[in-house]
Image (cartoon, rainbow, N blue to C red):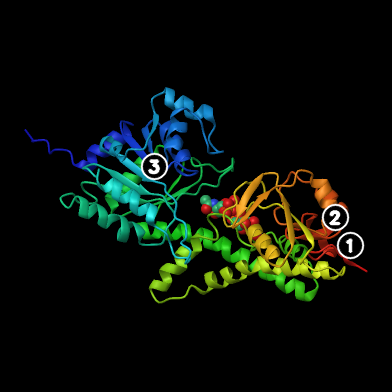
Amino acid sequence: MMERMPLSTRQKLLSRIDRREVSVAVVGLGYVGLPLATVLAESGYRVVGVDVNESKVRMVNRGLSYVEDIADGKLQSLLDAGRLQAVTDFGAIDDCDAVSICVPTPLRKTKSPDVSYILSATEAIAEHLHEGLLIILESTTYPGTTTEVVLPHFMQAACELKVGEDYFLCYSPERVDPGRTDWTTRNTPKVIGGVTEACLEMGRALYGHAIEQLVPVSSTEAAEMAKLVENTFRAVNIGLANEVLLICDKLGLNAWEVIEAAATKPFGFMKFLPGPGLGGHCIPVDPQYLSWKMRTMGYTARFIELATEVNTSMPLYWVHQVQDALNSVGCAINGSSILVIGVAYKQNVSDLRESPALDIISLLHEKGGRIQYHDSHVPAFTLGAMEMVAVKDLDLAIQKADCVVIATDHSDYDWDAIHREARLVVDTRATLGSAAAADRVGTDREAVAP
Ligand code: SAJ
């Protein structure tokens, strides 16, 4: 009688995943982690969210969502079904078969990567590393993080365990676009790479029951790089759109009109538009992770560096537009009342991270401008020593302002009325559309004409 070989760790975990008998920890319950926890729980796994923020943990356990993509009811139904809970204690990982790491990867003041959140999550998980555990890093980071930063901590913590045999390590970049309803965590194709073939097989098995389309690649470095290429592509092309604006300004052309015309080409073109600069927590940040990694290898990622130079120069360009507009009516920024409309980093969001509108406000303030703002998504914010509160009466503020600067084109404003009422408009978003704005290259010519 053939003696049955004991099942390997890999085989045992695979069959438990297929039977949905596994428990999954999601470390970091932010705009990436909470939707992922929800999707994993909905696909039949038992999910435990782990977050250092007690108030987030409390809210999740009360079925209260603080992430716009997740409705309270969805959380409550998963809580009621016993498929979801949240804790602050990493000890929960002792009873888990998988862990997804969804923590922030910001930039330091020196524009170098801040992987401290990945490090602290890795160290906490390493204390609970056990046979049969699958770990998947989701945070956007530079190529090599998984194998050069994360893996060594696991090897040190449990030298008796072998990656790819006793535990498994993958990288799968998040592609969450907050507020988006057409592309969600479940239906957005998801790239995934493993430290070994067996790691990749395990990651594909776990996510395969929750994510509609997986895109396996040959290594964790390839997966890390794919994510950076996605967002570097955007930053570089936004930089090109901004340079088109600078060129059109020299030529007396309207960049929006020119780009919209180019965009009628049905192939071989992808439209990006000029603006006040590059905001958000992804596009200004992710390419810096790649250029930093390249600098450590003695290579200059020239397109990234150039795009960064152009994009970060835009706030000052628009301040010069304000200066020219005021000068044309015999005024200076110094002493003029300037109303900035829209401070969020892009339309219809309330997020201020890296918003170029804040740079414009700081620069105008430094030049003596008396700054007010209005943003239907942002009631108040702090900028350095300035405590800013949105004006209450927008119409009155528009009439009283010497110049209105449109920095974010939220959909809930009547831009025609604003252009009609304002004495001067510097419009960083061509809110009247490219055609209407054709005779207003960024500034309202009628109001400026003598
Ligand atoms: N921007 C321009 N011109 C453009 C497009 C954007 O000036 O043509 C500015 C925006 O105003 C904003 C910044 O660039 O300040 C970034 O805008 P974004 O549209 O790239 O929006 P984000 O930062 O929310 O990017 C996210 C990313 N999603 C993920 O990383 C998962 C990005 O990959 C998405 O393509 C983007 O959302 C999206 O398409 O909404």
- Three-letter amino acid code of the residue under disc 1: Ala
Question: Which quadrant holds the C terminus?
Answer: bottom right
Where disc 3 sits, the SS reads: loop
**Left or right side of 85 for 335:** right
Number of marks: 3
For ligand 1, which image quadrant applies? bottom right
Query: Mark 1 touching mark 2, by CB under 8 A?
Result: yes
- Please state the horizontal and vertical placement of residue 75, each as a whole percent of the image: 48, 29
Earlier in the chain: of badge 3 and badge 1, it is: 3
Number of other residues with Cα within 10 Å of mark 2, as a class: few under 14, some 14 to 19, many 20 or more: many
- x 84%, y 68%: residue: 331
Where disc 1 sits, the SS reads: helix
Q: Which mark is residue 422?
A: 2
Residue 271 visible, this orientation: no
- The residue at which mark 3 appears reads as 52
- x 48%, y 64%: residue: 109
- The residue at which mark 1 appears reads as 447
Instruction: Please state which of residues 265 and 49 is positioned toward the viewer in this rendering.
Output: 49
Instruction: Please state which of residues 122 and 306 is positioned toward the viewer in this rendering.
Output: 122
Q: Is 187 above or below relative to 435?
A: above
Number of other residues with Cα within 10 Å of mark 1, as a class: few under 14, some 14 to 19, many 20 or more: some
Earlier in the chain: of badge 1 and badge 2, it is: 2
